[in-house]
Image (tube, rainbow, N blue to C red):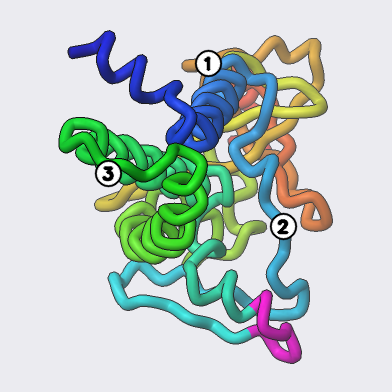
């Protein structure tokens, strides 16, 4: 069965979606290794608008002021609800699954439609359908990736976070901040190389850099605890 799936995945009618899925897998592998941030693909839908990331499951369709049709479409698809990389990953999985399923059924039934025509014809259906389903599926994921909530970003300064990336450098790093009764908040962090922070270490959030949306952190140990008590 596995060999059949591999053969089908690299068939002409499915190859674009398979390549897309491979890119997604490589991206997440890079995130795990710490080479990329989870928000590498993120962009601002409207720099002057506050994006509502409430925890309720209502479908959001915020309209950026003067954003135009493209911005409206991005907002409708809930691309702002989670990191773009997460949204795109869910979309890629849906698209690949639909392509494999439909083309597999066509081949089993001995359909006469050439692969190129199937690829073009199905794209008209698969792309919008996958995007529409992704719009709803990312809603339950919002609390996991929420970086702004009832507390402001600066309220997180002096909190203790847990490093989740393989390492933290001045260029990249990920950490999570535990929340009482809820999913931890995933945040971007930066630290001096000499801190030697790695996955599983605890770190103190020392500063929020608003223009780049990350937190400076330092190693949390007994010395840090003493300094906090005295400050």
Q: Which label sits in the foreground, 2 or 1?
A: 2
Q: Secondary structure at mark 2?
A: loop
User: Does residue 153 lie above or below 157 as drawn?
Assistant: below
> Which residue is at a point 34% across and 61% down the rendered structure image?
133
> Which residue is at a point 58% across and 28% down the rendered structure image?
23
Q: CA distance from mark 1 to mark 3?
A: 41 Å
How many residues crowd around disc 1 within 10 Å: few (fewer than 14), some, or many (20 or more)? Answer: some
Q: Is residue 42 visible?
A: yes
Q: Which mark is residue 199?
A: 1
Q: Which mark is residue 43?
A: 2
Q: Which residues are magenta?
A: 64-71
* Nearer to the camera, 25 or 141: 25
> Which residue is at a point 61% across and 20% down the rendered structure image?
30
How many residues crowd around disc 2 within 10 Å: few (fewer than 14), some, or many (20 or more)? Answer: few
Q: Which label sits in the foreground, 3 or 2?
A: 3
Taking the image as shown, residue 161 lies to the left or right of residue 210, namely left
Q: CA distance from mark 3 to mark 2?
A: 33 Å
Q: Which residue is mark 3?
A: 102
Q: Which label sits in the foreground, 1 or 3?
A: 3
Q: Position of residue 36 (x, y in %)?
A: 68, 27
Q: Position of residue 27 (x, y in %)?
A: 59, 27
Q: Position of residue 143 (x, y in %)?
A: 38, 55
């Amino acid at each position: 069965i596995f060999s059949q799936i591999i053969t089908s995945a690299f068939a002409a009618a499915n190859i674009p979606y398979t390549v897309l899925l491979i890119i997604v897998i490589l991206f997440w592998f890079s995130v795990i290794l710490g080479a990329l941030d989870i928000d590498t693909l993120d962009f601002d839908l409207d720099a002057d608008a506050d994006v509502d990331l409430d925890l309720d499951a209502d479908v959001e369709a915020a309209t950026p002021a003067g954003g135009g049709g493209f911005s409206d479409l991005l907002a409708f698809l809930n691309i702002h609800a989670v990191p773009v990389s997460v949204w795109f990953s869910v979309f890629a999985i849906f698209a690949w699954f639909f392509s494999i399923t439909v083309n597999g059924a066509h081949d089993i039934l001995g359909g006469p439609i050439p692969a190129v025509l199937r690829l073009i014809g199905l794209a008209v259906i698969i792309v919008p359908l996958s995007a529409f389903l992704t719009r709803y599926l990312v809603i339950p994921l919002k609390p996991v990736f929420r970086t702004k909530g009832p507390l402001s970003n600066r309220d997180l300064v002096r909190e203790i976070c847990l490093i989740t990336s393989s390492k933290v450098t001045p260029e990249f790093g990920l950490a999570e901040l535990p929340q009482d009764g809820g999913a931890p908040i995933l945040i971007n962090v930066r630290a001096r190389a000499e801190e030697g922070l790695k996955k599983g270490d605890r770190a103190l959030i020392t500063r929020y850099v608003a223009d780049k949306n990350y937190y400076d952190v330092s190693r949390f140990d007994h010395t840090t605890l003493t300094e906090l008590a005295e400050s």
